[in-house]
């Protein structure tokens, strides 16, 4: 399954634990500063938000604290992720989380009904991103925002050094794992992401490098013609 490939053969339970443990790294101060700069100015007070590949639902929980009137939806293909998210204590009604494979199924939202679609560390895993991006465009409101936050390519030497020094991973097993993950995490350059978004009909309105390994793109539907 794609999810296993993304973490080098980890089980669903291991992947879940890793997503929970590393949540503060992905959604720290820098993430929310970029969100406030690039996304918040475009959102209505009561946005409809969809998080694709939502994992354990922690991003939607945090977003619900910032936007108590938001309607939040999270979709993920891994049952353990959805089960974890459904047990989370959340303010208000909390997000609606459901099992969903973005590569097979249409989103259960009408065309133009969603103010924000977010996707963190998911698109790089998919074999064919363009049909998924087309489905995101379909559900986005005319001024809706697509927030893409994903891995970006770095040199092998720099990737290995980052895992060793940044993540503190050492030892032969972890080096083997780092080599296995290198092609997964270093699939797209910044220019590749920009090209993909343009090809799918999006115009980038904000871009930030949050970490050596990750880029954030904020995009809207490009004007026709
Ligand atoms: C690296 S995790 C990121 C989770 C979450 N976005 C976060 O940042 O905490 C990737 C997630 O994408 C989900 N995923 C992978 N392929 C998917 C698909 N085809 N449809 C829906 N979710 C998928 C996995 O189950 C996993 O939860």
Image: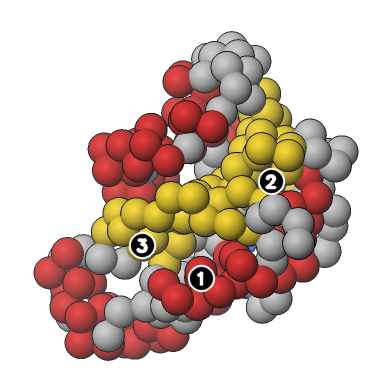
Left or right: 156, with 222 as reference point: left
Q: Which residue is mark 3?
A: 214
The numbered mark, 3 or 1, whose residue comes first in the sequence reads 1
**Residue at 70% of width from left, 53% of height from top?**
223
**Under 8 Å from ligand 1: the CB of mark 2?**
yes
**Where, quadrant-wise, is the N terminus in this rendering?**
bottom right
**Residue 196 location (% of width, % of height):** 60, 72
Left or right: 45, with 50 as reference point: left
Q: Which residue is mark 2?
A: 75
Q: CA distance from mark 3 to mark 1?
A: 11 Å
The numbered mark, 3 or 2, whose residue comes first in the sequence reads 2
Q: Secondary structure at mark 2?
A: strand
Q: Which residue is mark 1?
A: 193
Question: Where's ligand 1: which quadrant?
Answer: bottom right
Residue 21 visible in rendering: no
Q: CA distance from mark 1 to mark 2?
A: 22 Å
Residue 92 visible in rendering: yes
**Residue 71 location (% of width, % of height):** 67, 23
**Residue 77 location (% of width, % of height):** 69, 56
**Residue at 31% of width from left, 37% of height from top?**
33
Q: Secondary structure at mark 3?
A: strand
Crowding at dot 1, Cα within 10 Å, few <14 / some 14-19 / many 20+, comes out as: some
Mark 3 vs mark 1: give the one in front: 1
**Residue at 45% of width from left, 76% of height from top?**
191
């Amino acid at each position: 399954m794609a999810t296993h490939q993304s973490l080098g053969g980890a089980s669903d339970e291991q992947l879940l634990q890793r997503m929970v443990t590393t949540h503060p790294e992905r959604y720290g101060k820098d993430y929310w500063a970029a969100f406030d700069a690039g996304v918040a100015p475009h959102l209505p007070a009561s946005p409809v938000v969809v998080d694709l590949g939502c994992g354990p639902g922690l991003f939607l929980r945090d977003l619900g604290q910032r936007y108590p009137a938001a309607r939040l939806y999270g979709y993920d293909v891994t049952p353990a992720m959805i089960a974890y998210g459904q047990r989370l204590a959340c303010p208000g009604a909390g997000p609606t989380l459901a099992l969903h494979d973005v590569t097979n199924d249409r989103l259960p939202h009408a065309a133009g009904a969603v103010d924000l679609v977010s996707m963190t560390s998911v698109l790089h895993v998919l074999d064919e991103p363009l049909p998924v991006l087309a489905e995101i465009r379909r559900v986005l409101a005319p001024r809706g925002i697509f927030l893409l936050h994903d891995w970006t390519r770095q040199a092998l030497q720099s990737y290995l050094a980052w895992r060793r020094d940044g993540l503190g991973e050492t030892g032969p097993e972890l080096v083997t794992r780092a080599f296995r993950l290198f092609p997964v995490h270093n699939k797209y350059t910044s220019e590749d992401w920009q090209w993909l978004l343009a090809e799918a009909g999006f115009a980038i309105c904000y871009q930030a490098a949050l970490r050596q390994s990750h880029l954030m793109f904020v995009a809207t539907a490009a004007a026709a013609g």
